[in-house]
Amino acid sequence: MEVDGVKIFYREAGRPDAPVVLLLHGFPTSSHMFRNLIPALADRYRLIAPDYPGYGQSDMPDRATFAYTFDRFGALVDGLLVHLGITRYAMYVMDYGAPVGWRLALKKPEGITGLIVQNGNAYEEGLKEFWNPIKAYWSDHSEAHRKALYVLVSPEITKFQYTDGVADLSRISPDNWVHDQALLDRPGNAEIQMDLFYDYRTNLPLYPAVQAYFRKQKPPTLIVWGQNDKIFPADGARPYLRDLPDAELHLLDTGHFALEDKLDVMAPLIRGFLDRKVARP
């Protein structure tokens, strides 16, 4: 669907009149990360999983004319929902999906029926050692610090994101990093990723407003978190309970992309949460 001049690809499944769950993907992947979860929920829920610009099968506009920022991503996902006529939905937020989702929640808090948080940050406690080189880039926006981040789009790090912290690697399809790396390797895409690493700094000043949203709106919340993740460690999961004391927290023995080896655990937890807290009779 074209939104504000940008073609946004999205996966959709489920009845048009079913409760909506918006699935917001992380870096460096796309809606591809939800390919196995969608069929597990589609009999009762309407799933919408968009790709952000520069990811998956959405457009990759030129950086010279398009700002790759989380504000822009949030506005485009909001525009997609408007085009689809969706005003109420639960959100699954993961990694980059969290700052995109928080912008949607702050803009239209009454429309959020529930939250599923998987390795997605809303607290500064969640930004540990992995983020130090990125914070160095935030500090001065220097070319040297930018160049130091190119390793984060390398095949080794893409594979690391899927395999680190996983006990049984036979459960992880190598198609994941092959798929993601092919898209990262498109001409110009690495520069887009560097722009987004720099823009991630804009998320931290939003955290107090996001936490105030949690306290005021009290959205039903399920936290399913790969506790061995070095990018978004479990230090970022526990603080949610300060502002959402009724949230359900499950720390799973896996890494960053928890759906890849823990779908059999996560799908029942997510389905049970949605059935209890989100579904309409």
Image (tube, helix red, strand yellow):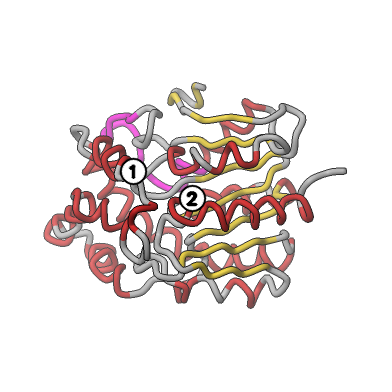
Q: Residue at x 43, y 38 (%)?
A: 32
Distance between the Cα atoms at labels 2 and 1? Answer: 18 Å
Residue flagged by tag 1: what amino acid is it? Answer: Asn
* Residue 114 place in picture, x, y as percent: 70, 53
Q: Which residue is mark 2?
A: 97
Question: Which secondary structure dominates the residues rendered in magenta?
Answer: loop
Q: Residue at x 49, y 60 (%)?
A: 120
Quarter of image, res 141: bottom left
SS label for mark 2: helix
| Residue 48 on the magenta span | no
Residue flagged by tag 2: what amino acid is it? Answer: Gly
Q: Which residue is mark 1?
A: 176
Quarter of image, res 219: bottom right
Q: Residue at x 37, y 61 (%)?
A: 168
Which quadrant does the C terminus fall into? top right
| Residue 62 on the magenta span | yes
Q: Which residues are magenta?
A: 60-74
Tell me if mark 2 has few (under 14), some (14-19) or many (20+) residues whose alpha carbon lies within 10 angstroms of its own: many
Tell me if mark 1 has few (under 14), some (14-19) or many (20+) residues whose alpha carbon lies within 10 angstroms of its own: some
SS label for mark 1: helix
> 203 above or below 196?
below
Q: Residue at x 29, y 69 (%)?
A: 130
